[in-house]
Image (tube, grey):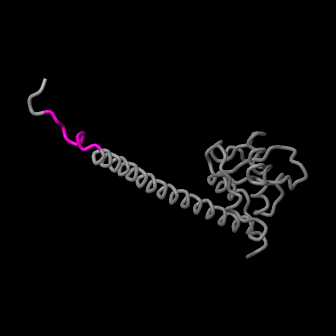
C-alpha cells in the first residue's frame, strides 16, 4: 500500500450528492498531489470541458450536510470557498488536464473505485428486488393461511349455502 492509498481510501471519499456519485476537489487534489487552488485554476481555465453533469459547486447546505454525515473536517483550516464535486465523467475529463504520472495512476484508481461502487449499487438493487418478491410471496401466503383458519373456525361460511337458483 503506497502513501496515497494509506492516507486516502478512494471508495470512502465518494459521496452521493444531488443523486450523483461524486468526489470532492480537495480529495482529488490530495490524490493527484497538487494544491486544490492549482487544480481548480486548471479547471476554470478549461471550464467548457466541465458541464454541470461533470462538475458542480456544493451549496452551503450540501457542504454542511456532508461534513455532518461523513465526519469531514476542515483540514484546510476553514474553507474560504465551497468545494467542487466531480462526477466520474468530470474525473475523466480532469485526467486530460493533469498529466503527471501520479495524476494518471491516481485517476485509474479513482475510475476503478467509481466502477466498483456502481457494481455494488447494482448488486444491492438486485438483492433488494429479490427481498421484495419474497416479502410479496410471504404476505400472500399469510393472507391465504388466515383465510384457511377462518374457514376452519367457521365451517358454515366455508361453502356457499345458496343453491343454483336464488333471488
Rendered residue at 79%/54% (across/down): 72
Is 140 on the left-hand or right-hand side of 19? Answer: left
Foreground residue, 97 or 90? 90
Residue 27 percent coordinates (x, y): 76, 58
Residue 51 percent coordinates (x, y): 65, 43
Extreme residue in the top direction: 167
Rendered residue at 77%/69% (across/down): 4
Q: Answer whether residue 131 is magenta in the image.
A: no
Residue 138 percent coordinates (x, y): 40, 53
Extreme residue in the right direction: 77
Q: Answer whether residue 158 is magenta in the image.
A: yes
Q: Is residue 60 above or below residue 102?
A: above
Extreme residue in the bottom direction: 1
Is 143 on the left-hand or right-hand side of 78? Answer: left
Extreme residue in the left direction: 165
Residue 1 percent coordinates (x, y): 73, 76
Rendered residue at 76%/39% (across/down): 61
Is 9 on the left-hand or right-hand side of 157? Answer: right
* Number of numbered discs overlaid on the protein picture: 0
Rendered residue at 63%/54% (across/down): 88
Q: Give the overall secondary structure of the magenta segment.
A: loop
From which residue to which does the magenta span run? 154-162
User: In the picture, residue 166 is in which quadrant?
Assistant: top left
Amino acid at each position: 500500500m503506497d502513501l496515497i492509498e494509506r492516507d486516502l481510501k478512494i471508495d470512502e471519499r465518494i459521496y452521493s450528492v444531488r443523486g450523483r456519485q461524486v468526489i470532492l476537489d480537495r480529495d482529488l487534489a490530495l490524490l493527484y498531489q497538487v494544491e486544490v487552488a492549482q487544480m481548480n485554476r486548471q479547471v476554470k481555465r478549461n471550464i467548457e470541458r466541465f458541464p454541470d453533469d461533470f462538475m458542480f459547486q456544493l451549496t452551503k447546505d450540501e457542504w454542511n450536510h456532508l461534513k455532518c454525515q461523513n465526519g469531514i473536517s476542515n483540514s484546510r483550516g476553514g474553507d474560504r470557498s465551497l468545494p467542487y464535486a466531480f462526477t466520474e465523467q468530470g474525473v475523466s475529463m480532469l485526467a486530460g488536464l493533469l498529466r503527471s504520472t501520479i495524476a494518471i495512476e491516481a485517476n485509474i484508481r479513482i475510475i476503478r473505485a467509481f466502477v466498483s461502487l456502481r457494481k455494488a449499487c447494482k448488486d444491492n438493487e438486485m438483492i433488494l428486488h429479490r427481498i421484495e418478491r419474497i416479502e410479496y410471496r410471504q404476505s400472500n401466503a399469510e393472507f391465504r393461511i388466515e383465510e384457511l383458519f377462518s374457514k376452519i373456525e367457521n365451517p358454515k361460511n366455508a361453502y356457499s349455502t345458496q343453491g343454483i337458483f336464488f333471488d
